[in-house]
Image (tube, rainbow, N blue to C red):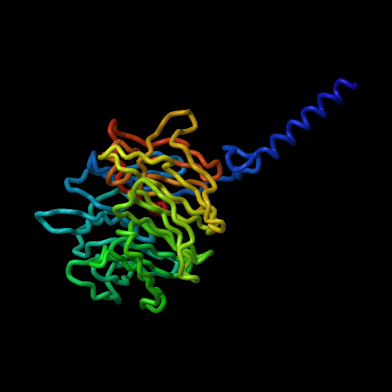
Amino acid sequence: MCKKISVIILVSVFMIFFILSCDKDCPTCPNDDTGPLGNYRLYVYDAYNQCIMSIDTPADTIVDSVRIDYYGVDIFITPDGKRLLAMRYDYDNGHKMEVFNTSDLSHIGTLEQYGCYHFDGADNYGILNNFTKIYFINPSDLIPLDSVDFNLPPEENLRDGYLDTISNQYFVTTSILADTTCIIYQIDCNSRTVIDSIKSSRYWGSIGPLAYNWLTNDLYFMTIFYDGAYFRQYDLAGDSLINSMSISHITGSISVSFDGKKVYMTDGGDGFHGLLPLHPIWVFDAFTHQPAYWITPWDTSGRWVGDLFGQIILTPDNRRAYLAGNPNSAGGTAVTVMDLRQNRILKVIEPFDVPDAFRIALGPVPD
C-alpha cells in the first residue's frame, strides 16, 4: 500500500512540474484547444509552374488547378468567395486583372482595373489601389464608387496598403520621395477621406509591407535603406516610434491576430543573393512589443521546410497560418502550414518537384 501511495505522489509531482514548466517554448501545452478547425479555401499562385491552385482547408488537399500562360503578380478573393482576381504583368498587352470562377477555376473575363484589391465583406465595400489613386468599389460588380487622389508627382506612386476591417481604416504608403522620406496615409473608410499621415525619417528609406492593430492603435511596417532593413512598431496615438528591430530584408509580411494580441512577422531574406534570415518567423506580444516566440523552419517530422517566407495569412478561427514564398526566394518554397496554438510548422503542400508558392489568398468555401 505504501509503495502504491509513493508511486501516486511521484506521478503527481511529475505532472505538476510538467504543467508549470510548460511555457512559451512548449510546442504542445495541455491547455491547447483541440476543437474543430474552420473550413476555408486557400488559393495559390505558383509562379514557376505557372498555375493557380485551389486548396481545401484544413484537409489541405488540392481540389482544383488551372494553368496560365502569363506572369502573375498577386491574387485576391471577393468577399462572397466566388471570384478570384489575378493581377497580370504583361509588357506587350498591358497590366490587367484576370477573373476566375472559384468553384472550378474557369476563366470569366478580363478587367482593365489593374491594382491591389482589399475587401470588407461585413460592411460591403472594397478598395482598389492602382498605385496612383485609391478607389472605393462595389464588391459585387467591382465598379468604382469614389476615389482618393494624393496628387503625387509623376515619378512617385503608392505602394503597399493594408485594410483593417474592424476599425475601417486603410493605410497606404508612398514610394520613396525626392527627400528620401515616405508618407503613410491613413484613410477612414466610412468618410472616405484622409484623416492622418506619417512622414518617415529621411534615414528609413523605402517602406515595405505594413499592418495595423485596432486593439493597440499601433502601426507595423518594414523599411530598407543603405544601413539595412528594419521592422518598426509605431504608436499612432503618441505619433512616435515604439520599437525598431534589424531584419534581413523587407521581402516578408506582417499579420495581426484576430484578437489583436499577437503580431506575426516573416523575415523573408533574399534567396537570389544568399541572404538568409536568422529567424524566419517571429511572433510579437502586441502589448509589450517584444518577441514572444521564434518559430523554427522544421515541421513536426523534423524536416526542414525552407526559410524564405513571404506572405503569412491567418485563418479567422485563429488556429492555422498559411505561408508562401517571397519574390526574392528564387523558387523552391511550398505552401507551408503552421499551427498557431502549438507555434510550430505542421507540413507543406507541394504538388510539384520545384514548388514556387509566389502568392496566396484565403476565402470562404465557394458554393
Q: Is residue 36 above or below residue 191?
A: above
Q: Residue at x 17, y 58 (%)?
A: 95
Compared to residue 180, the image places residue 66 above or below, namely above
Screen quadrant of the C terminus: bottom left
Residue at 41% x, 49% y is 246
Q: Nearer the viewer, residue 246 or 213?
A: 246
Q: Is residue 352 visible?
A: yes
Extreme residue toward the right, this view: 1
Looking at the image, residue 153 lies above or below residue 250 = below
Residue drawn where x is 50% and y is 65% of the image: 214
- Is 303 displayed left or right of 33 in the figure? left
Q: Is residue 41 visible?
A: no
What percent of the width, then of the height, locates residue 170? 39, 68
Q: Quadrant of residue 255?
A: bottom left
Please identify the quadrant where the N terminus is shown: top right
Position of 354 with respect to 294 (left or right) is left
The one nearer the camera, 264 or 334, is: 264
Q: Quadrant of residue 151?
A: bottom left
Q: Picture coordinates of residue 24 (x, y %)?
A: 59, 43
Occupied quadrant, residue 306: top left
Nearer the observer, 337 or 243: 243
> Furthest-left residue in view?
92
Q: Tell me residue 361's x, y (percent).
A: 36, 52
Is residue 188 shown left or right of residue 284?
Answer: left
Q: Is residue 281 left or right of residue 77?
A: right
